[in-house]
Image: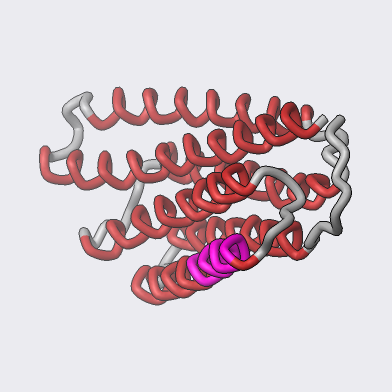
């Protein structure tokens, strides 16, 4: 284990936790699009606001990196982790925005299942983030996120098979596929976050 002989600024842990909490809020807001009679435009605005909040947290982390001499772990790892958390929210916001822009009143149940997977990934990410302080008991977290990402991949493939079975018109297929691609990218981004945390734990212990 590396010894640190100078004080550490622990504010980074709080900021990364706030970033992960925003992902929980963002995915929960995105899930509202599946409620009967949901106001998609209002939901899109809510998700957009959360994405803006996430950007503010990310920029705050980067500003603090530029003004802090001693960081609790490698500054490049903090930079990458902050960016990967922000990526998740960007993909979720893009998916919801496409639902609004394309005026998709109904989505296949597989898309709702994608978002359910994202909700589970967001919750365990938010629960895991405070444990970065001690870097203890995090292996269960990244193993589970990997499992969820595999589940998301299976859902996406099943959705593609359904979209191209000929029961929908070509334009609707393309619209729904774009939305699903963004949610799939969000699942991949959650795995990137978990991989980043695993890298930090391995390097710092």
Question: Residue 153 or 64: which is nearer the viewer?
Answer: 64
Residue 154 x/y as whole percent: 46, 23
Give residue 127's position: percent from left, percent from top: 77, 49
Residue range corresponding to the magenta coloring? 54-66
Q: Which residue is rendered at x = 77% and y = 34% of the image?
A: 204
Confirm whether the magenta stretch covers residue 63. Answer: yes
Instruction: Give the x, y percent position of residue 158.
Output: 39, 24
Q: Residue 124: x percent and y percent?
A: 72, 44
What kind of secondary structure does the magenta stretch mostly adopt?
A: helix
Q: Is residue 9 above or below residue 182?
A: below
Query: Looking at the figure, which quarter contains the N terminus?
Result: top right
Q: Nearer the viewer, residue 11 or 37?
A: 11
Q: Tell me where residue 191 sits by quadrant.
A: top right
Relative to 79, say whether 192 is above or below: above
Q: Residue at x 18, y 45 (%)?
A: 172
Out of 171 and 132, give the one closest to the viewer: 132
In this rendering, position of residue 128 left or right of residue 22: right
Q: In which quadrant of the rendered image does the C terminus lie?
A: top right
What's the residue at 83%, 49% (across, down)? 133
| Residue 73 belongs to magenta span | no
Q: Name the side, left or right, on which 19 lies relative to 169.
A: right
Residue beneath the point at 62% across and 48% down: 75
Q: Is residue 166 left or right of residue 10?
A: left
Q: Is residue 184 above or below residue 90?
A: above
Q: Nearer the viewer, residue 131 or 204?
A: 204
Residue 121, image quadrant = top right
């Amino acid at each position: 284990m590396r010894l640190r002989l100078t004080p550490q600024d622990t504010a980074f842990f709080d900021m990364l936790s706030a970033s992960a909490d925003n992902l929980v809020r963002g995915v929960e807001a995105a899930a509202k699009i599946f409620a009967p009679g949901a106001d998609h435009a209002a939901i899109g605005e809510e998700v957009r606001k959360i994405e803006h909040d996430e950007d503010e947290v990310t920029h705050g982390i980067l500003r603090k990196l530029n003004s802090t001499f001693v960081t609790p772990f490698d500054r490049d790892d903090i930079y990458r982790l902050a960016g990967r958390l922000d990526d998740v929210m960007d993909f979720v916001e893009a998916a919801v925005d496409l639902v609004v822009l394309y005026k998709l009143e109904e989505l296949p149940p597989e898309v709702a299942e994608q978002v359910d997977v994202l909700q589970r990934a967001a919750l365990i990410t938010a629960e895991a983030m405070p444990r970065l302080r001690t870097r203890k008991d995090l292996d269960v977290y990244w193993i589970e996120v990997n499992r969820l990402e595999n589940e998301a991949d299976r859902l996406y493939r099943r959705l593609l098979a359904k979209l191209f079975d000929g029961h929908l018109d070509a334009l609707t297929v393309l619209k729904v596929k774009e939305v699903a691609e963004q949610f799939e990218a969000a699942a991949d981004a959650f795995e990137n976050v978990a991989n980043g945390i695993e890298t930090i734990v391995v390097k710092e212990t």
